[in-house]
């Protein structure tokens, strides 16, 4: 057993000791979206700081805990807060929780984020189903020795964001009367917001939204054989789209305004997760 596998197992064993069930769906919630964790019934709260070898969240809007319990008839693990490369964490540390989820038996993964709108037809408050991503960073969470117990050295990303789950999400949105965008998410390193020139570049490359998270976690999840659904909340328009500066307070405020639709959408999706 490699040192990393040993650390992952230690964290998974600690979490497993707090529950008497196997979680089915793992979720990581972005800035301002952690309120979904309050919807979990029969909750078991585990603080990140209590989990062996687990990183700690430092960003405003991230509670720094996981909630395990029931949501729409499913056993879920909900992370309120994630870890970012810009916090100083290495990429493999950023995805540590995702790999712990897999060792807990989780095979389904829902990831959300707050994002800037690159597509000029988008508006703050829009919810976007992620169809694909663009990663400009050469760094990769799976760089280095491969953890063969989690997945293969080389793996396919053609359906990284499950077409089945995207279709299910769009149907759920239509039934709820919640219009959903669908598009490509671009990863930029942060912590600064992008320059107008960078946004023009991303738009030319086909990106619809941009953020500082999600892609590493999705790479690790797909590597580990999980089926993935990604949802971006467009909390602001990216640099150069509007003639105004960007700030994190706007991100949190916009996420709060759409929380009702966000919660309703995720609950509906979770209730039908197995459906084709």
Image (cartoon, rainbow, N blue to C red):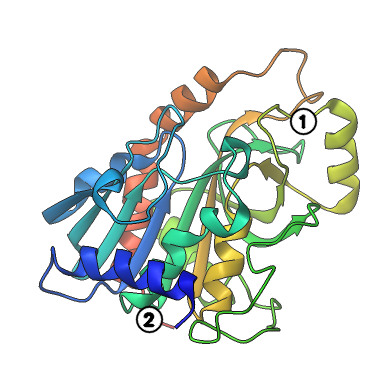
In front of the other: label 1 or label 2?
1
| Front residue (pair 212, 54) | 54
- Write down the residue under mark 1: 194
Q: Residue 132: where, in percent of width, then height?
A: 69, 63
Left or right: where does residue 271 sit relative to residue 95? left
For image coordinates 24% across by 48% down, the residue present is 50
For image coordinates 70% across by 82% down, the residue present is 156
Q: Secondary structure at mark 1?
A: loop
Q: On the image, which quarter does residue 98 sit in?
A: bottom left
Q: Secondary structure at mark 2?
A: loop
Q: Residue 135: where, in percent of width, then height?
A: 76, 56
Which part of the image, by quadrant, shows the N terminus?
A: bottom left
User: Which mark is drawn over residue 275?
Assistant: 2
| Front residue (pair 54, 262) | 54
Give the total of numbered labels: 2
Q: Residue 217: where, in percent of width, then height?
A: 55, 60
Which part of the image, by quadrant, shows the C terminus?
A: bottom left
Q: Residue 30: where, in percent of width, then height?
A: 46, 43
| Front residue (pair 196, 142) | 142
């Amino acid at each position: 057993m490699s040192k990393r596998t040993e650390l992952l197992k230690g964290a998974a064993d600690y979490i497993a000791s707090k529950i008497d069930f196997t979680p089915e769906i793992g979720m990581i919630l972005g800035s301002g979206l952690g309120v979904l964790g309050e919807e979990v019934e029969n909750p078991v709260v585990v603080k990140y700081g209590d989990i062996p070898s687990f990183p700690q969240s430092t960003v405003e809007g991230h509670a720094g805990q996981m909630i395990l319990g029931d949501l729409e008839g499913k056993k879920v693990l909900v992370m309120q807060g994630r870890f970012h490369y810009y916090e100083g964490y290495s990429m493999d540390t950023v995805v540590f929780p995702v790999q712990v989820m897999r060792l807990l038996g989780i095979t389904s993964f829902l990831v959300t984020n707050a994002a800037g709108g690159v597509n000029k037809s988008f508006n703050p408050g829009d919810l976007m189903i992620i169809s694909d991503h663009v990663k400009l960073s050469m760094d990769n969470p799976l760089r280095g020795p491969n953890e063969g117990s989690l997945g293969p050295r080389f793996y396919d990303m053609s359906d990284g964001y499950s077409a089945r789950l995207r279709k299910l999400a769009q149907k759920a949105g239509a039934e709820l009367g919640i219009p959903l965008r669908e598009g490509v998410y671009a990863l930029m390193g942060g912590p600064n917001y992008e320059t107008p020139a960078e946004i023009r570049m991303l738009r030319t490359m086909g990106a619809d939204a941009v953020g500082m998270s999600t892609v590493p976690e999705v790479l690790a999840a797909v590597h580990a054989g999980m089926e993935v659904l990604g949802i971006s909340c467009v909390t602001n328009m990216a640099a150069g789209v509007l003639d105004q500066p960007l700030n994190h307070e706007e991100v949190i405020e916009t996420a709060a305004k759409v929380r009702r639709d966000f919660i309703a959408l995720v609950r509906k999706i979770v209730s039908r997760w197995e459906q084709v």
